[in-house]
Amino acid sequence: MSYPNIDFVYLNEEDMIRAGVLDAAKCIETMRDTMALFGKKDFLLGGPKADEHGLQMNFPQKSDIEGFPLDDGPDRRFMAMPAYLGGRFHIAGQKYYGSNSHNSEKGLPRSILMVTLSDVETGAPKAIMSANLLSAMRTGAMPAMAATYLADRDSEVLSLLGPGVINKCALMCYMEVLPNIRKIKIRGSSINSKTALSMKSFIEEKYPRVNEIQICGSLEEACRDADVVSEAMSVTKDNMEEFHMDWFKKGATVFSMGSFLYRNYEEFLKTTMVVDNYGMYQKYLSNFKARGEYDELGNKREWVIMGIHFVHLVDSGQTPRENVINLSDMVNGTAKGRTDKDEIVMCSIGGMPLEDLSWGYDCYQRALEMGIGQSLNLWHEPYMK
């Protein structure tokens, strides 16, 4: 029996840019395709029930072993996120990354990501690609895609909470679907933060139609009077500001992709609650409870993911499950989007490796068409048969 030669494509970040990884309009439509397949259950995630976001390795906060790596900052972890996505993609693969907030001291991004695409039948690699931009774009495209169902198309004021890479990519996508944005509010760590000033310069250069940019000194200031709020903050619990419902105007649409500290959970019952993957937040809440009420240093734990708040309201009997709407049902036409101009919409976007696979696949296909990337050989023939 002969064994076929196996080659695969390696795409570095420059290759990914040439292949269109930053194409906001196309990424939005790929996310729409992805959520349509998710709603039809034409996918698999990891774990025994095929519903795991991924397998995360966390470091302890203290250790008796000399030199053992510790959880000494936000997002100190490694994570592997396998998935299969059907439909026009029919691809398996995974996103893998390591994350350390101290990377900034070395001039590196906090997280360094790679995506692998594999043949569904054989498991052979088809592509290995740089994924920092890929992941950021698919993350930013998801709320923009959701905004086509949930936000007022005439929205004029956009608020960016956390002016980092994720919200920069989200901004690129919001501007594709919200043509009347004229004012942008920015909330960074301070009014003089480098990332806030960098975001301001980016907006001035790329979007001359925006006639007012406001760097805000507090979370409340950033939220008030905004038509669309885009939260993508990466902060430690000690630095988190608690949100309050009276900050949001009637008709506001709030997207959370990061940290949303809110203690008066029942106030969400006055809003329209939307999630990208309800089961994922159920798993998050279950894992949260399994870790115990207090951490290793005796600090009380609090969940700070918007979707977990919604699950808690259902689990505690304060609202039926059907009151938390699936974004995929809107995409597939089995649920309505915004129905009232005055309703406040709260949408939790946690992200799934399905989105990395779909956008990675589309970039890979364009790379093949354009002859981009480096062909690498796995084997001409396996040594052991």
Image: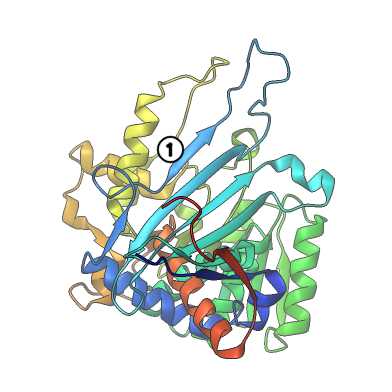
In the rendered image, residue 75, in percent from the top left (x then y), is placed at 60, 40
In the rendered image, residue 372, in percent from the top left (x then y), is placed at 64, 82
In the rendered image, residue 381, in percent from the top left (x then y), is placed at 50, 63
Residue beneath the point at 83% across and 56% down: 192
205 w.r.t. 78: above or below:
below
Lateral position of residue 113 relative to residue 116, left or right: right
Image quadrant in which you'd find residue 231: bottom right
Q: How many marks?
A: 1
- Residue placed most toward the observer, 268 or 196: 196
3 w.r.t. 245: above or below:
below
Residue beneath the point at 37% across and 57% down: 83
In the rendered image, residue 126, in percent from the top left (x then y), is placed at 48, 69
- Residue placed most toward the observer, 313 or 47: 47
Q: Is residue 326 visible?
A: yes
240 w.r.t. 200: above or below:
above
Image quadrant in which you'd find residue 376: bottom right
16 w.r.t. 57: above or below:
below
Q: Is residue 253 visible?
A: no
Amino acid marked by disc 1: Arg
Residue beneath the point at 48% across and 57% down: 382
Classify mark 1: residues with Cα within 10 Å, few (<14), some (14-19) or many (20+): some
Q: Which residue is disc 1 drawn over?
A: 263
Quarter of the image with the N terminus in it: bottom left
- SS at mark 1? loop
- Residue placed most toward the observer, 270 or 87: 87
Residue beneath the point at 44% across and 58% down: 351
Lateral position of residue 190 relative to residue 280, left or right: right
- Residue placed most toward the observer, 308 or 36: 36
Lateral position of residue 223 relative to residue 147, left or right: right
